[in-house]
Amino acid sequence: LLPCKLNISFIDTWRFQMTFILAIDQGTTSTRSMIFDINMNVVATDQTEFKQYFPKSGWVEHDPNDLWETTLKTCHKVMNDLGKDMHKIKAIGITNQRETVIVWDKKTGEPIYNAIVWQDRRTADMCEKMRLAGNEQLITDRTGLLLDPYFSSTKLKWILDNIKGARVRAEKGELLFGTVDCFLIWKLTNGKVHATDATNAARTMLYDIRKGHWSKTICDLLDIPMKMLPEVKDCAADFGDTHSNLFNKTIPICGVAGDQQAATIGQACFKPGMMKSTYGTGCFALLNTGDTPVVSKNKLLTTIAYQFNGKPTYALEGSIFVAGAVVQWLRDGLKIISHASETQELSQQADEEQNVIMVPAFVGLGAPYWNAECRGAVYGLTRNTGAPEIAKAALESVGFQTRDLLEAMSADWKMTGVSPTLRVDGGMSTSDWTMQFLSDIINAPVDRPEIIETTALGVAWLAGMHIGVYPNLEDFSSKWTKEREFKPSMDEECRNTKYLAWKRAVKSTLEA
């Protein structure tokens, strides 16, 4: 019997080595698909941008069919790159831009209106009326969120109120609502599955994060028919199989998480007190608070980090509206650089005697200020100020804003303390100069992982873990490796002086 057992083990090992996981990362400006091998290494990737629509000031929309078509296009491209091994893709994970709203016909799958994007501000007046009516505490108590047009619920109400016949059809059960993940699942399964995961549900401002179900009270308040809402599942679960016509085979969808939660998972922040910060266009920092939903006193959001076996793990989240976008402004607005990488060299050339502070409130300030009306400012300009000093101030603004978030998190969550180490990812985390300043200003180590694409990795692991080809949570966490650690080297007096100057600059910007 022994040779037989060894033979089976060899066959199983060989079979797993030929296994691949497809991750779909549907973002705000582009859709990307990536294929991971059995060792969670990327073996194929493709990315396609799509058109942004701005029908009015403050309005941001996508054509839902663009989201679907770019998803199919990128999936087919990476599958073709895999060649004859494409049939060895065993599961799919989906991560997505959060809070964006889509309403579609239950029979045809056709959207009745464009997707209203998370950045859209058209429901600001609606939120203000709800606030004046005394509904803000109700919303926060149940959802952990602030009453803000950033989230999905008021966007959904706007569609029902403004698209002819939408409310009547919704009440008849003819229309379905979903965030982007939900819409893609519906399309991939050819209308067989209407479901989302707990992390995306938690961002709609309709979901009771403590009781783990849709809030009838909030739905009634906003006059939203609950029959429109999807089933809420764990992050690793059975979300149905893709229709055979799409990829010439059926593939199970087994992992789903909103983009920032997927990055938290990809960074293996599974213990209370662990933090990650993702630096893209904006910045999103999440602090794992375990099974405790912490109520913030500093305008942070209480949300679900992930959910397994019906049990949610909670997080505090802080959002910075402008991170990498400030570098884009240097390139496209001021035109003092032609490529983002040039900011490092410029910053190194900056005059150390100048203390230029940039508050990049191009669209207001996020947490912990939550002021959408203030606008950006630059302080400390002299006749000698030039491109190097402006570039340095731009990069430093990201570190200052991150410290604001971390101090708010530490003040809100004092149970066992916050981890002294911050794990970072996203495009801006590749800047060594920026990450070193970040470490200096927060006075803590900053760890950059070997795999920067943590968002896609997070949902790939969810799907692979669910079907048993990737390691469990503990083993996955133990395999997380850093590419580089940045340690603080700035003296305390300098650190405090710089941060106090930043706080004065923010105060002046808010009061302007």
Image (tube, rainbow, N blue to C red):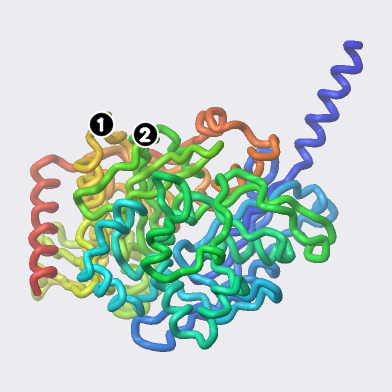
- The residue at 36%/75% (across/down) is 331
Quadrant of the rendered image containing residue 508: bottom left
Residue 207 seen anywhere in this rendered image of the structure: yes
Q: Label 2 is placed on what type of residue?
A: Pro
Asked if residue 87 is positioned above or below residue 273 in the image, the reply reads: below
Name which of mark 1 and mark 2 comes first in the sequence: 2
Which residue position is annotated with label 2? 272
Q: Label 1 is placed on what type of residue?
A: Met
Asked if residue 251 is positioned above or below residue 359 in the image, the reply reads: above
Q: Quadrant of the C terminus?
A: bottom left
- The residue at 82%/60% (across/down) is 244
Which residue position is annotated with label 1? 415
Q: Is residue 483 left or right of residue 186?
A: left
Q: Badge 2 local density, few (<14 within 10 Å), some, or many (20+)?
A: many
Q: Position of residue 349 (x, y in %)?
A: 24, 61
- The residue at 40%/53% (across/down) is 278
Between residue 470 and residue 139, name the one nearer to us. 139
Q: Are marks 1 and 2 in contact (CB under 8 Å)?
A: yes
Q: CA distance from mark 1 to mark 2?
A: 10 Å
Residue 360 seen anywhere in this rendered image of the structure: no
Between residue 172 and residue 363, name the one nearer to us. 172
Q: Report the residue that reaches farthest toward the top.
A: 2
Between residue 38 and residue 409, name the one nearer to us. 409
Q: Position of residue 187 (x, y in %)?
A: 68, 66
Q: Quadrant of the N terminus?
A: top right
Q: Is residue 374 left or right of residue 45?
A: left
Q: Is residue 148 left or right of residue 426?
A: left
